[in-house]
């Protein structure tokens, strides 16, 4: 973190957002566009001041693919946005782009690399705001007043939304398809002097950590982790690959393959055209279902495996699969807890202040027991000081935060 804030990053980039946390007094109607996975979401948000906001409308659509040309990505997104704006008339757009960006201002940022197995051509090293505005302009003859007011990472968004509702919120967490943290950093801790002052409060800036790329986890990688990394189309992101929903199911599948290859279980699970032969056929949703199957002989898991082409499984193999799923999910939560604890104590070594982490994402939200395991991880690391760091779920936090970031930018 220190190196990143000094402009000499290693595996944690610390990308500036060019905005501070909101005051909670911002007002107005904003369209929040959230692009971070195959499910593209748009939320019409009314900020009412006095730390109050209201969601007026929410719509989404699913991308046809995670690969293709630049037009395959931005053309359908632009069509979606234009249709929404034509119905609503709002012209203030906050754009969440949940991939690593090198931002040069609050409304411009270049994609530094694709993650989460996305791979659209001619987008890396390009300004994603310009690409989206070009696609919108192609549908309206010009932008028609439909410009992007602010650009932010999804972790920056969830932090901004949390801080709008509670001023103690100084971290934002996403654990969904991908995983990452953002943090509000006091100006005195920012070593870079080349950055312009942030919009909003000049005494701090929100940074997108991009900590999913942290390579310190090399020391605890398993053979399954290393194989997943070697076979992945996404470069780096080693910590994210041990945490995030895009990868957890695949870690389990590779572990099953290891055990089967040694002849220690899972007989015939990899023969023929069965699902465990193909990458990413066992999903994180499958992991969650298996980990929390409470039926007597794990019959629900047997039925689930049958849908994957693996029938006639033994109770012993199903129990071993469940044990692997639980351990992979627990490890994810514990690594996230370590990241939060490290970030909080970097900001505030003695935890003299209260810190709230606004959190969103499908894994954090939906995996049974995940939030409790994360809390236990914080307690193990921080001891009696753990109650100084509270992790709070904020539904649709990144989308709400896009509106808040756009409002902070509009105030200047």
Image (tube, grey):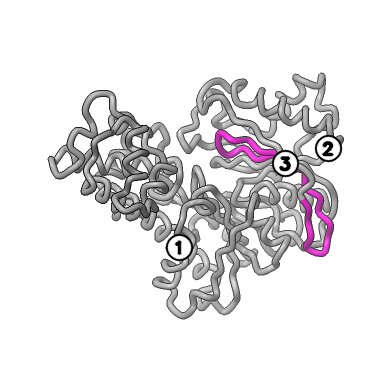
The stretch of residues the image draws in magenta is: 32-54
Task: Looking at this view, name the residue that lies furthest to the left.
Answer: 263
Residue annotated with mark 1: 374
Closer to the camera, 307 or 320?
307
Residue depicted at x 34% and y 54%: 326
* Measured Cα–Cα span from mark 3 to mark 1: 29 Å
Which residue, given by chain and number where applicable, does mark 3 sit on? 58
Looking at the image, residue 365 lies above or below residue 286: below
Among numbered discs 2 and 3, the one appearing first in the sequence:
3
Dot 3: within a 10 Å radius of its alpha carbon, few (fewer than 14), some, or many (20 or more) residues? some
Does label 1 or label 2 sit earlier along the sequence? 2
Q: Residue at x 38, y 42 (%)?
A: 249
Which marked residue is nearer to the observer: mark 2 or mark 3?
3
Residue under the image location 50 percent in, 64 percent down? 343
Indicate whether residue 48 is drawn in magenta.
yes
Would you say the residues marked 2 and 3 are in contact, meaning their CB atoms lie under 8 Å apart?
no
Marks 3 & 1, CB-CB < 8 Å contact = no
First-in-chain label (3 vs 1): 3
CA–CA distance between discs 2 and 3? 16 Å
Reply yes or no: does residue 156 show up in magenta: no
Question: Is 233 drawn above or below residue 374 in the view shown?
Answer: above
Q: Nearer the viewer, mark 3 or mark 1?
A: 3
Write down the quadrant of residue 258 in the picture.
Answer: top left
Query: Residue 275, percent across and down?
Result: 32, 30
Name the residue nearer the viewer: 150 or 412. 150
Q: Secondary structure at mark 2?
A: loop
Disc 1 to disc 2, C-alpha distance: 39 Å
Instruction: Write down the residue under mark 2.
Output: 91
């Amino acid at each position: 973190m220190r190196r990143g804030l000094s402009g000499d990053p290693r595996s944690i980039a610390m990308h500036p957002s060019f905005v501070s946390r909101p005051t909670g007094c911002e007002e107005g109607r904003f369209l929040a566009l959230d692009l971070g996975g195959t499910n593209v979401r748009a939320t019409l948000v009314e900020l009412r001041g006095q730390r109050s906001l209201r969601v007026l409308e929410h719509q989404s659509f699913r991308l046809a693919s995670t690969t293709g040309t630049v037009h395959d990505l931005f053309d359908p997104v632009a069509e979606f946005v234009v249709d929404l704006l034509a119905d609503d008339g709002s012209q203030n757009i906050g754009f969440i782009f949940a991939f690593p960006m090198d931002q040069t201002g609050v409304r411009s940022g270049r994609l530094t690399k694709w993650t989460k197995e996305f791979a659209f051509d001619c987008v890396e090293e390009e300004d994603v705001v310009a690409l989206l505005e070009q696609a919108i302009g192609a549908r309206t003859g010009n932008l028609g007043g439909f410009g992007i007011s602010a650009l932010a990472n999804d972790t920056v968004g969830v932090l901004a939304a949390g801080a709008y509702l509670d001023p103690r919120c100084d971290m934002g967490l996403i654990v969904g398809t991908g995983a990452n943290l953002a943090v509000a950093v006091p100006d005195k801790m920012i070593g870079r002097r080349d950055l312009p002052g942030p919009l909003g409060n000049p005494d701090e800036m929100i940074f997108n950590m991009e900590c999913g790329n942290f390579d310190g986890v090399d020391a605890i990688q398993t053979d399954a982790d290393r194989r997943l990394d070697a076979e992945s189309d996404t470069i780096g992101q080693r910590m994210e690959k041990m945490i995030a929903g895009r990868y957890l199911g695949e870690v389990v599948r590779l572990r099953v393959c290891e055990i089967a290859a040694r002849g220690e279980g899972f007989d015939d699970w990899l023969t023929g055209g069965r699902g465990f032969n193909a990458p990413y056929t066992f999903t994180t949703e499958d992991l969650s279902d298996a980990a929390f199957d409470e039926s007597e002989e794990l019959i629900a898991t047997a039925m689930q495996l049958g849908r994957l082409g693996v029938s006639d499984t033994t109770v012993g193999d199903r129990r071993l699969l469940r044990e692997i799923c639980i351990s992979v999910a627990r490890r994810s939560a514990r690594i996230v807890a370590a990241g939060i604890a490290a970030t909080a104590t970097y900001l505030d070594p003695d935890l003299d202040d209260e810190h709230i982490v606004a959190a969103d994402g499908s894994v954090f939200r939906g995996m049974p027991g995940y939030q409790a395991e994360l809390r236990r991880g914080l307690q193990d690391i921080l001891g009696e000081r753990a109650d100084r760091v509270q992790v709070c779920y904020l539904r649709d936090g990144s989308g709400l935060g896009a509106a808040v970031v756009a409002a902070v930018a509009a105030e200047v």
